[in-house]
Image (cartoon, rainbow, N blue to C red):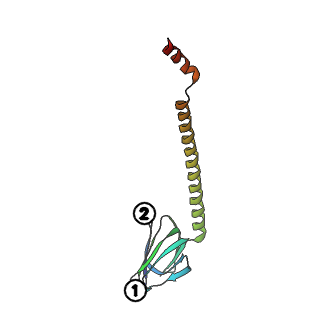
Amino acid sequence: MSKTLHLTVTTPAQVLVEADNVVAVRVEDQSGSFGVLPGHADLLTVLIPSVVRWRNADGATGYCAVRGGVFTVSQGHSVAVACREGVVSASLDDLEAKVRAARAQQLEAGRKARVEQTRIHAFAVRQLVRYLRPDPIAAAPRAREAVS
């Protein structure tokens, strides 16, 4: 039996964490927070938005904020987290700052997208109104030419 775990945290776009010398991992699912040590039974669960914590054999800790994900333990030594988004840091204070900055950036991007969507919608409505109700002054000379 291996005395360490191999931890992998991935998103669809990148590998956030690849660590071989991990002695403990702590995660949280719908039932609560729990830890995984080397030799743990195979496990599959869905994580809630939370912080994945791990400790290396040398005592160093790591943290990864995830927006939910899938957590698996296989063969007692392979631990994997697959998530859509994650932020990694070596300290909780730094992690909190990074998560706040990422959240602010997402909110700003969402705001800009809504503004652009509203602008495009207004332009489309104006085009429809112009098509359905042409300017009567501009249409008048054409109507007189048709009568003549």
Res 77 visible: yes
Mark carried by residue 2:
1
Q: Considering depth in this image, is 92 or 82 the residue closer to the camera?
A: 82
**Residue 148 image position (x, y, % from top left):** 49, 11
Looking at the image, residue 93 lies above or below residue 59: above
Q: Secondary structure at mark 2?
A: loop
Disc 1 marks which amino acid? Ser
The residue lying at 54 percent from left, 81 percent from top is 34
Q: Considering depth in this image, is 18 or 137 the residue closer to the camera?
A: 137
- State the image quarter where residue 82 is shown: bottom left
Identity of the residue furthest to the top in this view: 148
Q: Secondary structure at mark 1?
A: loop
Q: Considering depth in this image, is 40 or 22 the residue closer to the camera?
A: 40
**Residue 58 image position (x, y, % from top left):** 49, 81
Q: Are marks 2 and 1 in contact (CB under 8 Å)?
A: no
Disc 2 marks which amino acid? Pro
